[in-house]
Image (cartoon, rainbow, N blue to C red):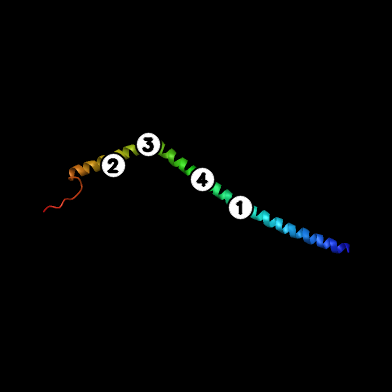
Amino acid sequence: MSSLTSSISNLISSIFDVLRSIFATIVSALDSVLAVFTNLVRSIFDLMSGLVGFVLGNIVIIGVIVAAYVGYTAYKQKNQGGGISKKRA
């Protein structure tokens, strides 16, 4: 009789161990997914920080390039009559 109760006790213990392992696996998977999203957001912020640092570090050069482009397009439109072709009747 004691072997029967011992067997039932072991069976119930094994079932609870399996359920506990499944729960631990699910929690671990959710933790991994959360870690992936956290690292993704952190990487995006690091990328944006680097981009802003690059732009601020080279703001004078970027400003000169933009000013040259605006001056070139204004010069081109002035010499070509506005750049819009007009139909003549």
Could you say which disc has been placed on residue 43 in the image?
4
To which residue does mark 1 refer? 30
Residue at 67% x, 55% y is 23
Q: Residue 74 placed where, x, y %? A: 23, 41
Q: Residue 2 placed where, x, y %? A: 88, 62
The residue under label 1 is which amino acid type?
Leu
Could you say which disc has been placed on residue 69 in the image?
2
Tell me how far mark 2 sits from mark 4, CA to CA: 34 Å
Q: Earlier in the sequence, mark 1 or mark 2?
A: 1
Q: Residues within 10 Å of mark 4 (few under 14, many from 20)?
A: few
Extreme-right residue of the structure: 1
Tell me how far mark 1 sits from mark 4, CA to CA: 20 Å
Q: Earlier in the sequence, mark 3 or mark 2?
A: 3
Q: Residue 76 placed where, x, y %? A: 21, 44
To which residue does mark 3 refer? 59
Circle 4 sits in a helix, a strand or a loop, which is it? helix
| Above or below 80: residue 23 | below
